Amino acid sequence: MLRIRLRRTGARHQPSYRIVVADSRAARDGAFVDYLGHYNPRTDPPTVVLDGEKARKWISQGAQPSDAVQRMLRKLETVDGTANESAADEGATDV
């Protein structure tokens, strides 16, 4: 199964990530099928650059986003959340 997930890059204690499509059995920093963008958590606010068209294409072909990537996609409004995720979010309240 293909997953859309984060691939760690950067030096020790200075992480940055690439958003890639990879086989779920591949190592975290191993081989990948396609590059979709990058994420830098060290900037304020964190930087996310993502090719939304490629992401939608891969999701339509059956690739499953990881939890972290799913949150990024929802925040960038690239894809809609599923019914299960929206039901879980209804219980959460922002203060």
Image: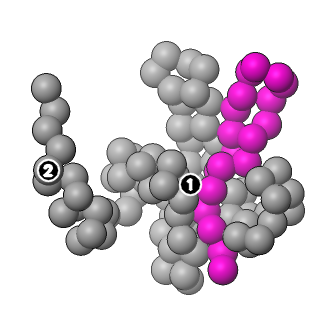
Q: Which residue occupies 29% across, 62% down?
A: 85
Q: Is residue 48 above or below residue 70?
A: above
Q: Is residue 32 above or below residue 63?
A: above
- Answer whether residue 14 is magenta in the image: yes
Q: Which residue occupies 40% across, 57% down?
A: 78
Q: Which residue occupies 21% across, 52% down?
A: 89
Residue 16 in percent (x, y) is at: 70, 32
Quadrant for the N terminus, please.
bottom right
Q: Can residue 36 be seen in this view?
A: no
Q: Which residue occupies 56% across, 83% down?
A: 61
Magenta span dominant secondary structure: strand
Q: How many labels does the image show?
A: 2
- Furthest residue to the top? 44
Amino acid residing under circle 1: Asp
Depth check: 77 or 90 in front? 90
Answer left or right for 60 relative to 89: right
- Answer whether residue 11 is magenta in the image: yes
Q: Is residue 38 above or below residue 61?
A: above
Q: What element carries label 2?
A: loop
Depth check: 5 or 53 in front? 5
Q: Which of marks 1 and 2 is nearer the N terminus?
A: 1
Quadrant for the C terminus, please.
top left
Q: Can residue 77 be seen in this view?
A: yes
Q: Is mark 1 on a helix, strand or loop?
A: loop
Q: Mark 1 points at which residue?
A: 51
Answer left or right for 4 relative to 60: right
Image quadrant assignment for residue 5? bottom right
Numbered tag placed on residue 91 in the rendering: 2
What is the C-alpha distance between the residues marked 1 and 2? 31 Å
Amino acid residing under circle 2: Gly
Give the residues drawn in magenta, as a range: 1-19
